[in-house]
Image (cartoon, grey):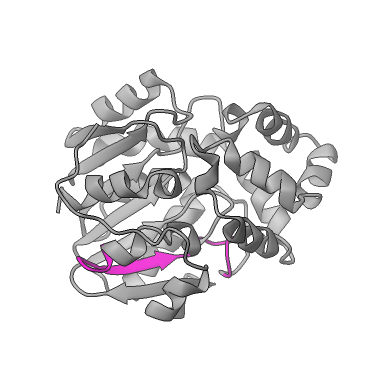
């Protein structure tokens, strides 16, 4: 566990729109998909890549402090938040392509990539391609598990839903029948302290899930999950500093954490104690410490 040497003030109970009032919401065309993003702060660029089934507001507790040190770009991934939805298969290379093009379109250089869960896996995948100017990577609980999508390890409900979602017809029914309370229960499986999941954020995520085409895109990720596992084989190509930040109660196994550490030659591992998978909400102070103490 890393020890903070910074005094960090996080936005614990602010409404979702608060970060939008502080920054500027914009859209950019990324290889044919309109992607929503928030720009806020001054300094070198830092790109935030959120988790599966969330959006840029997921990082609301760490954005204000990060913006004191960086120009922060928090984006909505394709098929998430208010970004465009494509009918293409939602394989990992698709996300890598669009996030990389997002960075190119904004002409960002020496970027610090910070991603949580699938966002962490995407940050590593982008770095492995060596096609954009990256200064460093922070992968928070990267979701690149072996024979698992992670959510099937979160709880009994998660296992039922995210195993069943791949079954023909039954999986379609699951992906189109999501209810707000079910979403909350699934997300809570990634928290050590469930009170750290604000009700207004669950409301926002649930409302976003009602968009036309959203459930199909969401299911497509699970149908193509093998591409997330396969991309790990490229991590040895990463040439920039990488900090792997794992929570004590993350869904990854110890062997999976060590495999990433050994596979990435210029990497180090930090553990955050008493924290679940969704660390940027569950323990924002220590996430900020891990990032800003390496600045």
**Farthest-out residue, top:** 255
Would residue 129 be visible to someone looking at this image?
no
Stretch of the chain drawn in magenta? 66-82
- Quadrant of the image occupied by residue 260: top left
Q: Magenta stretch mostly in which secondary structure?
A: loop
Specify whether residue 51 is painted magenta. Answer: no
Of residues 142 and 96, the one drawn nearer to the viewer in this rendering: 142
- Of the 4 image quadrants, the one containing the C terminus is bottom left
Q: Residue 40: give x, y in percent of width and height.
A: 32, 74
Q: Residue 275: give x, y in percent of width and height.
A: 41, 35
Would residue 85 be visible to someone looking at this image?
yes
Q: Residue 185: give x, y in percent of width and height.
A: 67, 41
Q: How many marks?
A: 0
User: Is residue 284 rendered to the left or right of residue 88?
Assistant: left
Specify whether residue 76 is painted magenta. Answer: yes
From what the image shows, is residue 215 above or below residue 24? above
Q: Residue 179: give x, y in percent of width and height.
A: 77, 51
Residue that appears at 42% across and 38% down: 231
From what the image shows, is residue 269 above or below residue 92? above
Of residues 289 and 10, the one drawn nearer to the viewer in this rendering: 10
User: Is residue 214 rendered to the left or right of residue 13?
Assistant: right
- Quadrant of the image occupied by residue 252: top left
User: Is residue 23 rendered to the left or right of residue 170?
Assistant: left
From what the image shows, is residue 121 above or below residue 46? above
Residue that appears at 50% across and 54% down: 94
- Of the 4 image quadrants, the one containing the N terminus is top left
Residue that appears at 28% across and 63% down: 65
Of residues 258 and 104, the one drawn nearer to the viewer in this rendering: 258
User: Is residue 70 rendered to the left or right of residue 260?
Assistant: left
């Amino acid at each position: 566990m890393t020890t903070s040497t910074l005094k960090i003030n996080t936005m614990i109970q602010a409404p979702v729109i608060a970060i939008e009032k502080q920054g500027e919401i914009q859209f950019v065309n990324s290889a044919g998909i309109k992607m929503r993003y928030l720009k806020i702060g001054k300094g070198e660029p830092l790109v935030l890549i959120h988790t599966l089934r969330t959006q840029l507001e997921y990082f609301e507790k760490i954005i204000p402090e990060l913006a004191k040190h960086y120009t922060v770009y928090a984006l909505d991934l394709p098929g998430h938040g208010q970004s465009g939805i494509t009918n293409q298969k939602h394989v990992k290379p698709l996300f890598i392509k669009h996030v990389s093009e997002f960075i190119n379109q904004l002409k960002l250089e020496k970027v610090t990539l910070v991603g949580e869960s699938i966002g962490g896996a995407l940050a590593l995948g982008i770095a492995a391609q060596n096609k954009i100017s990256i200064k460093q990577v922070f992968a928070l609980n990267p979701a690149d598990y072996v024979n698992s999508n992670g959510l099937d390890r979160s709880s009994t409900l998660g296992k039922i839903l995210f195993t069943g979602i791949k079954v023909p017809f039954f999986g379609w029914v699951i992906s189109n029948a999501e209810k707000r309370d079910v979403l909350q229960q699934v997300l809570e499986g990634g928290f050590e302290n469930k009170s750290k999941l604000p009700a207004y954020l669950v409301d926002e995520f649930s409302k976003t899930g009602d968009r036309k085409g959203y459930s199909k895109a969401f299911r497509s990720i699970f149908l193509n999950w093998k591409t997330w596992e396969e991309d790990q084989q490229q991590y040895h190509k990463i040439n920039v500093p990488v900090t792997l930040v794992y929570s004590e109660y993350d869904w990854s196994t110890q062997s999976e954490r060590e495999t990433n550490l050994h596979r990435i030659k210029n990497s180090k591992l930090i553990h955050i104690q008493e924290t679940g998978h969704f660390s940027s909400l569950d323990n924002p102070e220590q996430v900020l410490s891990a990032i800003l103490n390496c600045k």
